[in-house]
Amino acid sequence: MLSLSPATFGALGDGRTIDTDALAEALSAARGASGAVLLDAGKVYKTGDLKIPRGTVLIFSPGARLAPARPGARLTIDGRIESIGFDRIFEDGWTFYKSEPDILDGFPDVPLEWFGGLASWTERRDALPAFRYALAFCKAMRCRAILLGNGSYFVSDTIRIDGTVGIKGAGMESTFLIRRGGAPNAATIQLVGVRDDAVGNLEYSGFSLLPLEREGVGTGIAADWFAHVRLSEVEFRNLATGLDLVDGAYSWQILGCRFLNNRTHVALGPNANNLIVAHCQLMHGETGIDCKGASNSISIGAETNFEALTGQPIRWRGNGTTLFRFSITGCRFEKCVGAIGYGGGNARALAFSFDQGFVENVNGTTSHFFDLTNCESAVVSRSYFQRCNAALVNAPRSASQVVICDNVLRDIPQINSASKSGGFGEEEGFSRCRAYNCGGVKGSA
């Protein structure tokens, strides 16, 4: 590819001289030759409104930058931009624009460093202005994601995302996003959608979220009306709430995430639909998954682990909360205190299933592991329970159509802790289970 230097057309790149005409000529010549314009290393090119035409590539050498001659100068990017390295390439003040929209011509993912972000293990520069600048660029260019490097990024307030822009880091152990200011209970990342017109098709992956000042404050990610989101290998640590799906979470995949020492690991609000949690770890802290609104088709499984929680691993609570088709499959519960299930109000669950689970060393302050109050059509099957200092279920009369079958039980003191048993009996509700050193099968009448 032919590379042209702006100096050939009279550009100085000294950060003071206006190089608009020289750069425009260079870009026009490159377009005619199907080539590129290479900005010289360390040069700052100050321009007014500038257009990078389709079929043209503007390449930034290390340290090269574009600076607007006035605040709000328009940089129209119909061609491509490339950078040699991860230096800053845009000075503050540009308005980004794309004049030839093409639904199949989205811009590649862009590093936060292009906009002044800095990944560092020692410096605590505020990255919030860089995030806002990058988001404005991505919105104009239809970028899919902002890229983060190895190190820590500190933000003084919430990163507010209201478009189709994701964030991708270098890994949970490599990229850290740390909030060190703003309201104490604010989110580090706030995803803001529109009711019944959810923003969708995004990925957030490969970084850790934690507060700086003290443990147990703030929210990692809060989302309203975002759909088709893939949340992969993100760590939520030492927060009041790790992930808060406030309303309208449709078709989310939460995969391989780690929730550590949060008061509530995942909060699930109303209108959640088709939610998958898989290969995640929810450890220490209080509540695992807190369901606070009517939701449909929630699946938790594929070796998701709940460990050392002082509250309920999974609960549904509140008035008007109905969970429909809520399944827990292939999960592991160890050293937890509270019960799975009912957590207060008139909350209820329809078509609840617990399958292929492993439960060990549950030392409940409650008297049971499952609370099936207001639960209809519950199935507990093909699971292994051992060394639990609690009854298996609380199935009072408000529970109906409860089936417990094909399980292995060891050292379970009692099956049903309810004083008035609900909708299962010894033959029809509790069958094909192998019990060793366990209490009676039937709840007391």
Image: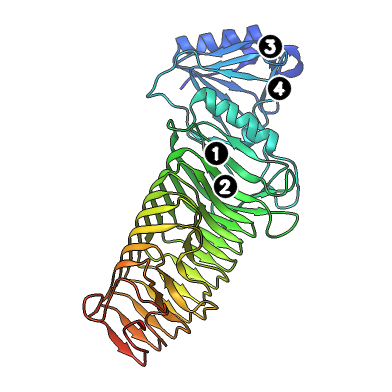
Q: Position of residue 27 (x, y in %)?
A: 54, 12
**Separation of marks 4 and 2 at Cα, in angstroms:** 37 Å
Which residue position holds label 1?
191
Which residue position holds label 4?
44
Question: Do the residues bearing badges 2 and 1 touch, measured as CB atoms within 8 Å?
Answer: yes
Q: Which of 48 and 180 is in front in this view?
A: 180
Query: Can I make out residue 87 in this image?
Result: no
Residue drawn at point x = 60 percent, y = 12 percent = 50
Which residue position holds label 3?
19
Q: As shown in the figure, which amino acid type bears the numbered disc 1?
A: Leu
Could you tell me which secondary element the residue under label 4 belongs to? strand
N-terminal label among 1 and 3: 3
> From what the image shows, is residue 392 above or below residue 9?
below
Q: In which quarter of the image is residue 18?
A: top right
> From what the image shows, is residue 390 above or below residue 86?
below
Residue extending farthest to the bottom is: 437
